[in-house]
Image (cartoon, helix red, strand yellow):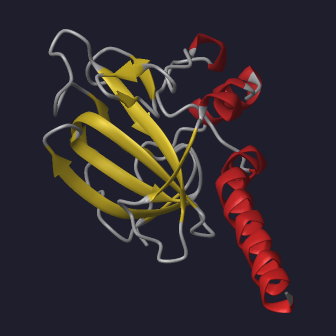
Amino acid sequence: MRMTKGVGVVAALLAGLTFAAATDGPALLAARTLRVPVDGVAPAALTDTYDQGRGERRHEALDIMAPRGTRVVAVDDGRIAKLFTSVPGGLTIYHFDPAGNLAYYYAHLDRYADGLKEGMTVRRGDTLGYVGTSGNARMDAPHLHFAVFRLGPEKQWWKGQPVNPYPALSAIRATAATAAFTSGRSRPRPS
């Protein structure tokens, strides 16, 4: 009986930890000072496409429509973890927050910003790339596919718990977004 009770306590603790890990991503994201990752797009103009279906799966990202070549900027301070080209995402960037708890994913880019490289430190508002249609994006619909995920203890750039970025981005005050836009930073800082 004691063994069963002990196993039950351990199972309950593990379940609580699993629940906490799955739910702290939104709290971590809400605690960050963010900006909209596409220049000229106001927080109020964003559409929550996170739960939309994409065939057999959920989208788990925001599609931010903008003209081809519009600047894509860092939503947060942090470092560039990976520059990657894939069939679905095309030219992509994985950007970790300063603590390495969250990964920001930017996809369908037309090109990277000059000088952008893995390991580089970036600040919120630094140019990372430009809106495009690479990967499986429709050629007539340039946009940024933007996703966030909570990293696990291994800090693997390709793996994590998805977090809906819409609540955090749509809550940004327009004045904060425009201040970051007009700060004049156009290139990432070398690390």
Relative image position of residue 41 (x, y in whole percent): 53, 18
Residue at position x 48%, y 47% in the image: 126
**Compared to 74, does 181 lie above or below?**
above
Residue 121 visible to an observer of this rendering: yes
Residue at position x 44%, y 56% in the image: 95
**Compared to 79, does 125 lie above or below?**
above
Relative image position of residue 154 (x, y in whole percent): 47, 77
User: As rendered, which of 17 and 179 lies closer to the eye?
Assistant: 17
Relative image position of residue 131 (x, y in whole percent): 30, 28
| Left or right, residue 87 beside residue 10 | left
**Compared to 180, does 101 lie above or below?**
below
Which quadrant does the C terminus fall into?
bottom left
Q: Residue furthest front?
A: 1
The quadrant holding residue 145 is top left
Residue at position x 58%, y 48% in the image: 124
The quadrant holding residue 157 is bottom left
Relative image position of residue 189 (x, y in whole percent): 44, 61
Which quadrant does the N terminus fall into?
bottom right
User: As rendered, which of 83 and 29 lies closer to the eye?
Assistant: 29
The number of discs equals 0
Residue 182 visible to an observer of this rendering: no
User: As rendered, which of 81 and 129 lies closer to the eye?
Assistant: 81
Q: Residue furthest bottom?
A: 2
Residue at position x 75%, y 82% in the image: 7
